[in-house]
């Protein structure tokens, strides 16, 4: 029937995993379309907490096909661990999980290259998750990459050796020690054998068959729109299209099948890694957001930088994605703030006030804020929109009016149940 796309409107970690898991029972298929093990999507339900990296967040719901699309880059070693960690939940991944033959592989040498390239950049490093994402996508675009379907070929080992030989030349040039490959390669081959036992499919056919059979599909984004390779704060971005267009190329369906675009954002902002962040708070307020919001990376454990909600950036992401509904997350984190700020415009060094994102990422942007009174009460238990405190309703209304898209979901806690659907 149609595909709904859920994607992050900020710099990732908006709470995509929680909401995909929450919405999944309404769908027949949940599919990831880009990224790889750089993602960390956290699910909490019935007192359990689980972080997914490459597996779609519909995996905990029964009778849903979970598809890993062609747009991903997959680390087989991480994947094996990730899949096996589902055993304790008795999930039937042999039946419910499908991997595209056209997804690219992250080799152990890609991870070394990621580290070597970051090291070479010195203080201009991206702050990559060091999961091999950039180098693997580089080989994909350079038409040298290895794909999941290749592991079924008798020539796979030969192709692998060729590519790794290439990588070693690079690593030597960058003076980066590649001796650890001796330890990781056996794990890689074991993981490839494991991967061969799972459902490796032509996922574009699977998706289009589902569409033709009137099934409902939810496409799950990774990272966030401000990390998009084309529209993010380049070069401080990830190496894939994180916006809605990435869902089409990363799964192989036509634009006319897109129905809703759910844009998910936090009631404030966070960013991991380097790069511009106009509303960043480097003071005790930022520290308070980090502490209450538990803002530490789900993949790397790094401290997330924290700041106020940035509406020019949010509007930009809404525009790029054609968002039809907004989901606002982690609203409870603001419960104990007397005053809450929202950046509505930027003041540029030449004095110009704008609500557009300037091309030059090095500009010293000064955020123009509007201040709101906090609600100063616990809201985790609330399940009805109308029961939210009036100050929070004012906050919601202001954002809706400013961006022109309705906020239809409000998240008041990390648990699946702590969700208000309007
Ligand atoms: P994702 O990458 O977009 O899936 O988000 P992450 O899982 O990396 O980060 C979101 C974090 O916030 C996780 O630890 C979630 O458990 C948590 N979380 C999600 N929604 C809420 C919420 O409404 N309130 C609070 N306090 N935590 C939340
Ligand atoms: P989820 O799906 C937050 C950031 C990294 C770095 C930049 C490039 O959990 O929201 P990469 O490893 O992709 O080369 O890193 O992108 N980054 C994320 N930040 N959430 C993510 O994923 C991220 N994936 C990558 O911190 O700044
Ligand atoms: Mg995350």
Image (cartoon, rainbow, N blue to C red):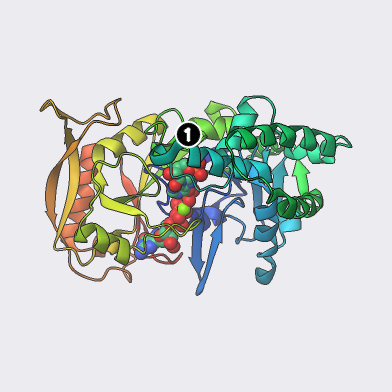
Local secondary structure at mark 1: helix
Quadrant housing residue 261: top left
Quadrant housing residue 262: top left
- Asked if 410 appears above or below 213 in the picture, the reply is below
Q: Quadrant of the C terminus?
A: bottom left
Q: Is residue 349 visible?
A: yes
Write the residue at 31% across / 47% down.
407
Q: Quadrant of the N terminus?
A: top right
Farthest bottom residue? Answer: 47
Residue 170 in picture, x, y percent from top left: 63, 33
Image position of 90 (left or right of 125)? right
Q: Which residue carries the number 1 mark? A: 244
Residue 84 in picture, x, y percent from top left: 70, 63
- Judge by depth and name the residue closer to the eye, 99 or 272: 272
Write the residue at 35% across / 45% down.
326
Residue 393 in picture, x, y percent from top left: 20, 55
Image position of 82 (left or right of 341)? right
- Judge by depth and name the residue closer to the eye, 47 or 363: 363
- Asked if 343 appears above or below 21 in the picture, the reply is above
Q: Is residue 221 visible?
A: no
- Asked if 389 appears above or below 14 in the picture, the reply is below
Farthest right residue? Answer: 154
Tell me the crowding category of disc 1: few under 14, some 14 to 19, or many 20 or more residues within 10 angstroms, Cα based: many
Residue 45 in picture, x, y percent from top left: 50, 69
- Judge by depth and name the residue closer to the eye, 412 or 27: 412
- Judge by depth and name the residue closer to the eye, 95 or 38: 38
Q: Could you tell me how many numbered marks the image carries?
A: 1
Write the residue at 16% across / 61% down.
374
Is disc 1's CB within 8 Å of ligand 2? no
């Amino acid at each position: 029937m149609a595909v709904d796309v859920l994607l992050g409107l900020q710099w990732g970690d908006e709470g995509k995993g929680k909401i995909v898991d929450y919405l999944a029972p309404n769908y027949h298929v949940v599919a990831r379309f880009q990224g790889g093990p750089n993602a960390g999507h956290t699910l909490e339900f019935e007192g359990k907490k689980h972080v997914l990296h490459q597996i779609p967040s519909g995996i905990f719901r029964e009778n849903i096909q979970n598809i890993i699309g062609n747009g991903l880059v997959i680390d087989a070693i991480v994947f094996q661990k990730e899949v096996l960690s589902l055993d304790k939940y008795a999930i039937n991944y042999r039946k419910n999980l499908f991997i595209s033959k056209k997804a690219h592989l992250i080799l152990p040498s890609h991870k070394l290259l990621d580290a070597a390239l970051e090291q070479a950049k010195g203080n201009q490093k991206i702050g990559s998750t060091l999961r091999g994402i950039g180098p693997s996508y580089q080989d994909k675009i350079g038409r040298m990459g290895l794909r999941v379907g290749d592991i079924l070929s008798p020539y796979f080992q030969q192709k692998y050796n060729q590519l790794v030989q290439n990588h070693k030349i690079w690593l030597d040039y960058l003076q980066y020690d590649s001796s650890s490959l001796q330890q990781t390669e056996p794990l890689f081959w074991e993981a490839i054998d494991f991967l061969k036992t799972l459902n490796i499919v032509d996922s574009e056919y699977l998706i289009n068959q589902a569409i033709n059979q009137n099934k409902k599909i939810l496409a799950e984004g990774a990272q966030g729109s401000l990390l998009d390779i084309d529209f993010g704060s380049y070069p401080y971005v990830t190496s894939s299209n994180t916006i809605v267009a990435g869902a089409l190329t990363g799964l192989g369906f036509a634009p006319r099948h897109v129905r809703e675009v759910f844009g998910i954002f936090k009631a404030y902002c966070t960013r991991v890694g380097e790069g511009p962040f106009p509303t960043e708070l480097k003071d005790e307020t930022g520290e308070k957001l980090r502490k209450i919001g538990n803002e530490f990376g789900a993949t790397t454990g790094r401290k997330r930088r924290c700041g106020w909600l940035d509406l020019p950036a949010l509007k930009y992401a809404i525009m790029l994605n054609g968002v039809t509904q907004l989901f606002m997350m982690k609203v409870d984190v603001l419960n104990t703030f007397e005053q809450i700020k929202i950046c509505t415009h930027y003041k540029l060094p030449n004095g110009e006030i704008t609500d557009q994102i300037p091309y030059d990422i090095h500009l010293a942007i000064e955020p123009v804020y509007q201040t709101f009174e906090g609600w100063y009460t616990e809201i985790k238990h609330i399940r009805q929109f109308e029961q939210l405190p009036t100050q929070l309703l004012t906050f919601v209304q202001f954002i809706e009016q400013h961006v022109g898209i309705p906020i239809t979901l409000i998240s008041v806690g990390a648990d699946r149940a702590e969700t208000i659907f309007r």
